[in-house]
Image (tube, grey):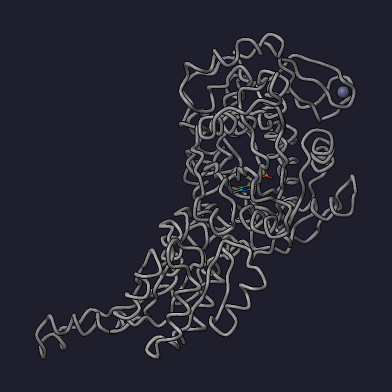
Amino acid sequence: MSSNFTVACIDCGHKTPYTATSVSCPKCGGEWRETQYDFDKLKNSFVNLIKKRSFGLWRYKELLPVRSPGNELTLGEGGTPLIRAANLGMMLGLPNIYIKDERQGPTTSFKDRQAAVTIAALKEAGVTEAVIASTGNVAISYSAYSARAGIKLWAFITSLVPPVKMREVALYGTQVVKVTGNYDQAKQVAAQFAKKRGLYVDKGVRSITTVDSMKTIAFEIAEQLTNLLGPPGLLNTDSQPKAIWRTPDWYIQSVSGGLGPVGVLKGFSELQTMGLVEKIPSIANIQAEGCAPMVHAWKAGKEIADPIAVPKTHIATLATGDPGRTYTFLRQKMLSASGGTFESVTDEEAFKAMHILAKMEGISVEPATAVAFAGLIKMVRNGIIKPTDVIVINCTGHTVPVEQEVIGDNWAKDVEFPTPEIEASVPAEDGLLAALNRVTDDRYTRIAIVDDHPHVRQLIRRILQAQGEYELFEAEDGLSALKLTKENKPDLIILDLMMPEMDGFSVLDALRKDPNTASIPVIVVTAQELTSKEKERLQGQIQSLMQKGDFMSEELIEEVRALTK
Ligand SMILES: Cc1ncc(COP(=O)(O)O)c(C=O)c1O
Ligand SMILES: [Zn+2]
């Protein structure tokens, strides 16, 4: 029960008790206010209080602005898993990438946290009708919780939002209002409508409940990382560890309005205030290049972001052209508390990241979420993220039915079931078999994968199998590689260099000496930095050299295709 907090105006400092329906500071009229909890009291009891509760959003109810949270509205929000991205990590050379899987919320996006807390607070305040503007996911999530709470919801949605999303909003009983225009315009129309009707309108990052709901992502990450990696180490030998929870080096999130990072940053700051964590992670805010007002401002060192009048991205979810004061607020917090950066990626980079994540990690995300993953890849390649860094990336939304532009053509094979006429003339099985034969080749390209690490072999196998049809052979050392090559005559060998007993160099020597194997193309994949002498030894012996941890699946597959044409 959170009675031990007040709401403070960030402009004049004036403090008031919390009322869900009051939207501005009574003294100066400012709309930017934040909760302040009684941390002196909480810091001694918080960990013991939460210990007994199940892992979910309401576990942290002392730090949420709902006075008496009950169970009636919950749909199981929060408590999402933190999943290690081992394959993506191997491909990027980062062993510690963790995915905070917000797809597993009740309506498959991180907006469920915001909706659960906001609707609970509105219900407590007796609100029965409310208005929101949305790029899709907020409307879906608020609609679900409003249905449970008996609140009539009006959702102003831009016409850019995929129709499947709009229809889901309508299914919940929300009145959808399609606004032909961009998201910023939809927000204006919603605000006018609410004013005229005297209704509560959700103000996104300027609402108390929305920001505080997102803090729970930070709380969960700190607990989960500590469970996975153990508590933070001693700072120096003679001091006891002060903090008991661990934080990542980086927290990465795709950003439109900017609520996510603002809330998560507040969450980590509150943990730091209570002495539970030592440091606040650097925040990486990733935007779609065609609508990246915050990135432009950050890179230009500006305090205020210039709005983008016409967003040029297919990713409607992220099309907030005017971030307003949120950017200024976030920038100032990052500069004073956490550090971090703003980065942008193209729609194409995001779509590529969707493929990698689905094919290599079994995680299907919507384009807006893929923007964060494409940002991660870019930051690793730019050297901003280091191989030793611990990364948590917010996986904020599940794929809506996969759109054509993401999947492209040729993703299915067609089988025509034999028609009655054909079936009459040939035995039924022949008809079916003949149809199926047209689907598969008799002989696939044969590739040998030689590596002493089983997880590397598995990674390469997966990269190949997810994107083509190959007959694959595996060898875990040099001698079996040679034996396998003689027996199976592969069209291509993917070879590791560092292997016990017979290394890759010796395998190459033997292959090239034997006329039967001399011309098989070889791609060397190695983890080591090669000396100039070693590079010389490979000259003329191999067709391609790839660094482990520095090849993304697509590059390897391109090499393979080029060499086996
Ligand atoms: C999947 C997804 N990613 C990112 C965002 C951006 O969130 P914010 O507007 O809080 O920056 C949203 C917002 O709806 C979203 O649904
Ligand atoms: Zn004020």
At horizontal 53% and vertical 56% (from top left) the residue drawn is 90
Which of the pair 510/359 is nearer the observer? Answer: 510
Which of the pair 315/303 is nearer the observer? Answer: 303
Q: Could you tell me residue 537's position as x and y percent?
A: 58, 78
Q: Could you tell me residue 344's position as x and y percent?
A: 73, 57
Where does the N terminus fall, quadrant-wise? top right
- In the displayed structure image, the side of residue 457 where residue 370 appears, left or right: right
Residue reaching furthest to the front: 501
In the image, residue 385 above or below residue 105: below
Which of the pair 51/556 is nearer the observer? Answer: 556
In the image, residue 353 above or below residue 210: below
Q: Could you tell me residue 445's position as x and y percent?
A: 38, 81
At horizontal 69% and vertical 32% (from top left) the residue drawn is 211
- In the displayed structure image, the side of residue 131 where residue 302 appears, left or right: right
- In the displayed structure image, the side of residue 89 where residue 342 appears, left or right: right
Q: Could you tell me residue 519's position as x and y percent?
A: 45, 88
At horizontal 50% and vertical 45% (from top left) the residue drawn is 84
Q: Quadrant of residue 377?
A: bottom right
In the image, residue 508 above or below residue 376: below
At horizontal 36% and vertical 68% (from top left) the residue drawn is 474
Count of numbered tags: 0
